[in-house]
Image (tube, grey):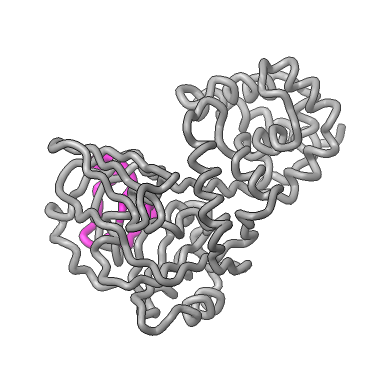
Amino acid sequence: MDEADAHERAAVVERYARFARDEAPGRSPLYAEWADGVASDPELAAILARIPATRRQPPLVFAVTRMLGAPEGAFPAWAAWLVEHGEEVVAEASVRRLQTNEPQRCAALLPALATVDGPIALLEVGASGGLCLYPDRYSYRYRGSGGVLALDPDAGASPVVLECDVTGEPPLRLPEVVWRAGIDLEPLDAADVGDRRFLMSLVWPGESGRTERIAAALDIAAAEPPHLIAGDASDPEVLRAAAALAPADATLVISTPGVLPHIPRAGRERLLDAVRTLDAVWITIDPPALHDRWRPPVDAASWGGFVLGRGGHPLAAVDPLGSFVHWRAWLTGGTDAAG
């Protein structure tokens, strides 16, 4: 083994040990077991070291193995399968990327969307399969101190029901979305069997309800496909070209829910600068310390979650996957920020 191979294998061991120790516990005991096993097995580490470093994240590699038929059981059986199917896993993981598409995130986005006068043309950056482009087609159950507020589309209860804990008094109403589009480096097709299987494989074992929710959301997207554009939205021309497709008689909303941490800083700054030049409302869900666009500034240590923002104005502390909304616009001056 040459020095470069040894370095890559050591990187795999460190990455999977960290995942087993810090990320998987409490969310997926099975993934914690698999990652700990990889970190302790030189043969498996050597197989995974052949995957490009940007494509060998444990959740991605584990999803690929499950998509390809790995047994979802104890580590020895999974490890034996990986040894047998190593070439296939390396090839598939090398062309995939983490594209988790969680419609539950719409429960966190909805209060910000409710501040926008409709009709809305919704353009999402990092759209994956487009499942967060249908906030008007899902049902919501917001649990607060006064009980449960139920929101359903005009046609009746949706097969996708999103439950969310809420504090404060956010505006809660379904938006009127008349156009929906997304930009992604590698968009996924909700009607494609392989893409559907991959998206559902990205659900971690032990996360009850997510597979069924994503499957139901995929059916909605497949029945009325959004306009998905393959491109790099950090290129201002790509973003402007996509925005130009929106109908002129609708309010353009550009959403970046959860994607900005995955864009290198220079590209992220280009993207945010480009958004500012457009006649659009910018709605985002970001870690509080990710950028300095919050007005007023956010104290990351005390905020209590990710930031739901409109036009750089912080509105609420939210779970990035939509399980809670703590409305705080009353603390930060309302929703009158530009954009």
Count numbered badges in the picture: 0
Q: Is residue 336 shown left or right of residue 119?
A: left
Residue at x 27% of width, y 40% of height? 304
Percent from the top left, x then y, of residue 76? 73, 15
Residue at x 75% of width, y 42% of height? 51
Percent from the top left, x then y, of residue 47? 80, 32
Q: Is residue 11 visible?
A: no
Residue 79 sits above or below residue 248 on the image: above
Residue span colored magenta = 285-308
Relative depth, front residue between 259 and 182: 182
Residue 122 sits above or below residue 107 on the image: below
Residue at x 23% of width, y 41% of height? 166
Residue 322 sits above or below residue 185 on the image: above
Kindly indicate the quadrant of the structure image that contains residue 111.
bottom left
Kindly indicate the quadrant of the structure image that contains residue 223.
bottom right
Q: Is residue 194 visible?
A: yes
* Quadrant of the frame with the C terminus: bottom left
Relative depth, front residue between 114 and 174: 174
Q: For residue 303: magenta?
A: yes
Percent from the top left, x then y, of residue 279? 35, 80
Q: Is residue 81 shown left or right of residue 329?
A: right
Q: Main secondary structure of the magenta part?
A: loop
Q: Is residue 62 shown left or right of residue 273?
A: right
